[in-house]
Amino acid sequence: MMADYGILRAKVLRRFEGHDYVPGGPLVFVWHVHHGKLLGPLIAPIEERIDYIIDQKEDHEIVTRLDWLRPVMCELPEVFVKAWAEWDRAWAEWDRARAELDRAWAEWDRARAEWSRASAEWSRAWAELDRARAECSEELEAIHVRELSGCPWDGTQMVFDAANAAEG
């Protein structure tokens, strides 16, 4: 049975008052926010990270992770902060491009489905045309002979006579 982490959750939330993620706001750096990283910026409200830890991490890790999940209070080296800010801008651009790609794929899926429907309709119409052509083939041949007497059609294709080519 999972433990109740409500008191610890509330304690961590209090720790982050005034130091939480704000979309488009300044980066908020946090100690031990992600496994295997000393520190990093919040990319979502701290409450989401806390809930993720409680819901997804092993029980024996939760208390330690939440105890040491803390906002960075000191000034960090400028080069480090600038590098993260550049990454954050690049991430936002990547995310916008991914959203555009998702929209394009959705449009492609819609167009592909429409094309599939049209292709199926075209195939049905082609089959109907073949059926009608077969049903009327003798009548069509008779009309052809009446209208184009002497045409070199052999019933399946035009037959070309090289000797008559220059007569035009």
Image (spheres, rainbow, N blue to C red):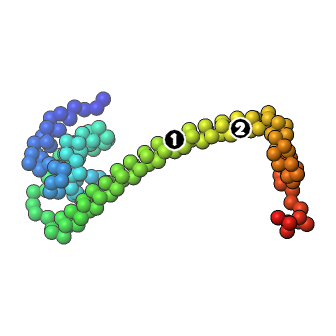
Q: Nearer the viewer, residue 144 or 12?
A: 144
* Mark 2 vs mark 1: in front: 2
Q: Is residue 36 visible?
A: no
Quick check: 154 left or right of 96?
Answer: right
- Total numbered badges shown on the rendered structure: 2
Determine which quarter of the picture holds residue 163. Answer: bottom right
Q: Which residue is mark 2?
A: 129
Distance (Cα) linking label 2 and label 1: 22 Å
Image quadrant holding the C terminus, namely bottom right
- Residue type of the residue flagged with mark 2: Leu
Q: Is residue 111 visible?
A: yes
Mark number displayed over residue 114: 1
- 88 vs 122, left or right, is left
> Where on the picture, by quarter, is residue 126?
top right
Residue 40 shows which numbered tag?
Answer: none
Of all residues, the one furthest to the top in this rendering is: 1
Q: Secondary structure at mark 2?
A: helix
Crowding at label 2, few (<14), some or many (≥20) Cα neighbours within 10 Å?
few
- Residue 132 position (above or below residue 149): above
Q: Secondary structure at mark 1?
A: helix
Amino acid tagged 1: Glu
Q: Position of residue 24 (x, y in %)?
A: 18, 53
Return the x and y of residue 26 as percentages of the image width and height.
14, 57
Residue 145: horizontal and vertical position, in percent? 85, 44
| Image quarter hosting the N terminus | top left
Q: Earlier in the sequence, mark 2 or mark 1?
A: 1
Q: Image point 19% across, 45% down: which residue?
A: 46
Give the residue drawn at x 29%, y 38%.
Answer: 55
